[in-house]
């Protein structure tokens, strides 16, 4: 499986945890944006750590949401 992170901009509060945990994947200004890729396990860890639950993970092949 390959996860694609998607930011729920209406939920993102720009805490910056995602950028701190995965600076190669996320950049935070007014809201987080996705700028790169990472292993599925790392993406899941970062998504679970988001205090606003603003990171949605989608399976690249099926298009199904896998988190949250």
Image (cartoon, rainbow, N blue to C red):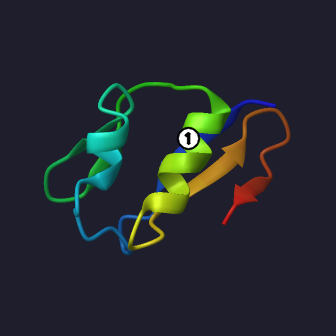
> In the rendered view, does 22 fall on the left or right side of 62?
left
Identify which residue is drawn at 82% across, 33% down.
61
> Residue 43, relative to residue 15: is it above or below?
above
Badge 1, how many Cα within 10 Å: few under 14, some, many 20+?
many
Q: Position of residue 32 (x, y in %)?
A: 29, 51
> Residue 36, relative to residue 6: is it above or below?
above
Q: Position of residue 29 (x, y in %)?
A: 14, 51
Residue extending furthest toward the left: 29
Q: Position of residue 44 (x, y in %)?
A: 61, 47
| Viewer-proximal residue among 11 and 20 | 20
Quarter that holds the N terminus: top right
State the count of labels.
1
Identify which residue is drawn at 33% across, 68% down.
12
Identify which residue is drawn at 78% across, 45% down.
63
Quarter that holds the C terminus: bottom right
Q: Secondary structure at mark 1?
A: helix
Q: Which of the 4 image quarters holds residue 33?
A: top left
> In the rendered view, does 60 fall on the left or right side of 22?
right
Residue linked to disc 1: 43
Identify which residue is drawn at 15% across, 59% down.
30
| Viewer-proximal residue among 11 and 21 | 21
Q: Position of residue 10 (x, y in %)?
A: 36, 74
């Amino acid at each position: 499986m390959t996860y694609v992170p998607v930011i729920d901009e209406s939920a993102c509060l720009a805490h910056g945890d995602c950028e701190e945990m995965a600076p190669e994947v996320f950049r935070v200004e007014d809201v987080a944006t996705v700028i790169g890729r990472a292993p599925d396990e790392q993406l899941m860890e970062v998504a679970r750590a988001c205090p606003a639950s603003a990171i949605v993970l989608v399976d690249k092949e099926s298009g199904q949401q896998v988190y949250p």
